[in-house]
């Protein structure tokens, strides 16, 4: 018998906040997704997390236990609840349990330092923290200065993945997550959100140009973005989604809500390892995952010759266009790549390179060229422009550079406690991305660079992305990135950092000659450095600012 049928589910429609609403209106919230799935798919396997298996009915009970436990500890609507945790059941539960009481979830990047984490906890005013025990050493040094933090709930994630159990011993005031839930009621209750514009989450930016900013997501935005993901990537109730994308990154692009909403299965992965990813794809019959091209490269290298996935696999990638060799390899493995683009301020993806069937018969090089484009706005968020400094649309000629601006359902409500930054970001009535792109005649955009990444050499604008695209065509190049470095004559000039494929050998002169055959000579790298690794974010995006800081130490940035 379904414990979430009839009376429990009807709580939604008897909420006080629905009183007085027109018949044609609903208050949009992803919390509606859980209530629907609990009624439609209660006995379906919802969560796979190491040796833990949960049906949606079991998951729902844990969500309501968490919500009731937080409420019992005095957490109220509007309070902030932070979470510092690897991909795990607890993070999925927090995505529903925290907003269930009207509180606001604050996911924190697990790769930050203690000081950076302390800033986010302090700036957000978090009253409670859900903490992965493995990460407790990050909190211990700053615990005494976190005066607003009243509750710390510690989860043992490692033991579910063949690791040694970890506990909260390093934090005397930490309480075990399972104990926290145990004495709490699993009974569902009506959530108190009476305004779909109410914040559901605050995600902090990477802070590469100063202190990170808190980006406010709303119930309405999260609901619509989750629907957009369901549609654009083709999620179905029989889909299985592998969590290679960090759940703390833009709320996992809203996939915690999307996967639950459609009744698909979550497969949690605390750490991305190529062998483990391949094993889970096969064992759990995974149909979807998200990741940067670096994850695709790892997977391509792990799969043996002649191998093919048992089920059709859809891979959603961002951060950089997938190289032609990776597109070809993924096709050989039976995978389809969807290229998306967005920012923290747009709930993750805002555009998708919407694929057209007539492109299937094109050559690999032509398909790679088309798939490299960032594309068009998501179905629920089509408002997208490329504009000049006067906010005029640039010609759709595939050549004229402008800034990408967006507005509508996929854009943040604003920056938390930072009205001036919000005003600047929304000037002219559009969100300014800081990304430079061209508009093609068919309405698809293609990024050329970040404003801060563009190289200005001798008065010429040089796109680092354009150079990187050529470098990825080289048969010996595994990964590459390009930045501008000081040049006495030209102000700055391109330098390439390259990771070669295992066992490969070549020279800087050969790489430069390869580029000169394919690019205008002034665009080609003047310097090439072969490296073992590149600095990256938690989602695999290369951190060019780290390389720039090293190269520009002692120099003043000049534009010639």
Image (cartoon, grey):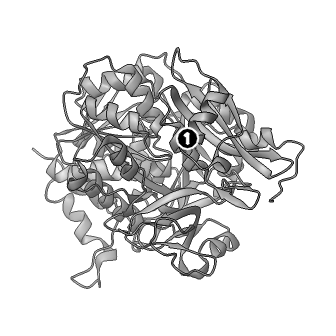
| Vertical order, 358 against 443 (above or below) | above
Snapshot quadrant of residue 93: top left
| Vertical order, 507 against 142 (above or below) | above
Viewer-proximal residue among 228 and 545: 545
Position of residue 87 measured from the top left corner of the image (x, y, whole percent)? 44, 36
Q: Is residue 492 left or right of residue 72?
A: right
Position of residue 294 measured from the top left corner of the image (x, y, whole percent)? 48, 34
Position of residue 125 measured from the top left corner of the image (x, y, whole percent)? 65, 56
Q: Residue furthest front?
A: 517
Viewer-proximal residue among 482 and 144: 482
Snapshot quadrant of residue 284: top left
| Vertical order, 304 against 207 (above or below) | above
| Vertical order, 148 against 513 (above or below) | below
Viewer-proximal residue among 454 and 279: 454
* Quarter the C terminus occupies: bottom right
Q: Which residue is mark 1?
A: 517
Q: Is residue 526 left or right of residue 400?
A: right
* Quarter the N terminus occupies: top left
Q: Residue furthest left?
A: 1
Q: Residue at x 25, y 85 (%)?
A: 22
Can I make out residue 543 in this image? no
Q: Residue at x 26, y 30 (%)?
A: 332
Q: Residue at x 29, y 48 (%)?
A: 259
Position of residue 356 measured from the top left corner of the image (x, y, whole percent)? 25, 56
Q: Residue furthest right?
A: 554
Can I make out residue 132 in this image? yes
Does dot 1 land on a helix, a strand or a loop? loop
């Amino acid at each position: 018998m379904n414990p979430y049928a009839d009376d429990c589910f009807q709580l939604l429609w008897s909420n006080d906040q629905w009183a007085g609403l027109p018949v044609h209106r609903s208050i949009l919230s992803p919390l509606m997704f859980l209530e629907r799935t609990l009624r439609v798919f209660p006995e379906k396997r919802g969560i796979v997390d190491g040796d833990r298996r949960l049906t949606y009915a079991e998951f729902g009970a844990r969500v309501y236990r968490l919500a009731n436990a937080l409420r019992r500890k005095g957490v109220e609507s509007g309070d902030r609840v932070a979470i510092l945790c690897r991909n795990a059941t607890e993070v999925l539960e927090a995505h529903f349990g925290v907003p269930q009481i009207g509180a606001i979830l604050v996911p924190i990047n697990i790769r930050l330092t203690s000081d950076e984490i302390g800033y986010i906890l302090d700036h957000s005013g978090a009253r409670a923290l859900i903490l992965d025990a493995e990460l407790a050493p990050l909190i211990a040094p700053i615990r005494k200065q976190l005066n607003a933090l009243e509750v710390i709930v510690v989860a043992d994630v490692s033991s579910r993945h063949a690791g040694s159990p970890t506990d909260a011993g390093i934090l005397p005031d930490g309480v075990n997550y399972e104990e926290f839930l145990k004495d709490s009621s699993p009974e569902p209750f009506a959530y108190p959100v009476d305004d779909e514009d109410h914040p559901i989450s605050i995600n902090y930016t990477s802070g590469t140009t100063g202190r990170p900013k808190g980006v406010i997501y709303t119930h309405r935005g999260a609901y619509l973005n989750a629907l957009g993901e369901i549609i654009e990537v083709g999620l179905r109730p029989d889909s299985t989604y592998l969590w290679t994308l960090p759940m703390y990154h833009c709320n996992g692009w809203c996939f915690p809500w999307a996967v639950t909403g459609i009744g698909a299965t979550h497969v949690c992965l605390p750490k991305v390892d190529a062998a483990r990813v391949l094993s889970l794809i096969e064992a759990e019959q995974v149909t979807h995952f998200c990741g940067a091209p670096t994850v695709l490269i790892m997977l391509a290298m792990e799969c043996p010759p002649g191998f093919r996935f048992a089920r059709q696999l859809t891979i959603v990638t961002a951060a950089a266009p997938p190289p032609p060799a990776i597109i070809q390899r993924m096709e050989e493995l039976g995978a389809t790549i969807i290229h998306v683009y967005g920012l923290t301020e747009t709930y993750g993806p805002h555009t998708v390179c919407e694929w057209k069937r007539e492109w299937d018969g094109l050559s690999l090089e032509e398909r790679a060229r088309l798939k490299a484009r960032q594309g068009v706005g998501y179905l629920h968020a089509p408002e997208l422009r490329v504009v000049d400094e006067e906010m005029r649309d640039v010609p759709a000629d595939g050549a004229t550079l402008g800034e990408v601006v967006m507005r509508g359902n996929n854009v943040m409500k604003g920056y938390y406690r930072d009205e001036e930054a919000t005003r600047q970001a929304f000037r002219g009535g559009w969100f300014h991305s800081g990304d430079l792109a061209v508009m093609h005649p068919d309405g698809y955009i293609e990024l050329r660079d970040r404003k801060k990444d563009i190289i200005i050499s001798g008065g010429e604008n040089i796109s680092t992305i354009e150079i990187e695209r050529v470098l990825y065509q080289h048969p010996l190049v595994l990964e590459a990135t390009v930045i501008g470095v000081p040049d006495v004559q030209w102000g700055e000039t391109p330098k390439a950092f390259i990771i070669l494929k295992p066992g490969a050998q070549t020279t800087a002169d050969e790489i430069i000659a390869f580029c000169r055959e394919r690019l205008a000579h002034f665009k080609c790298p003047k310097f090439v450095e072969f490296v073992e690794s590149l600095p990256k974010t938690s989602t695999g995006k290369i951190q060019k600012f780290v390389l720039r800081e090293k190269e520009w130490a002692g120099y003043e940035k000049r534009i010639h």
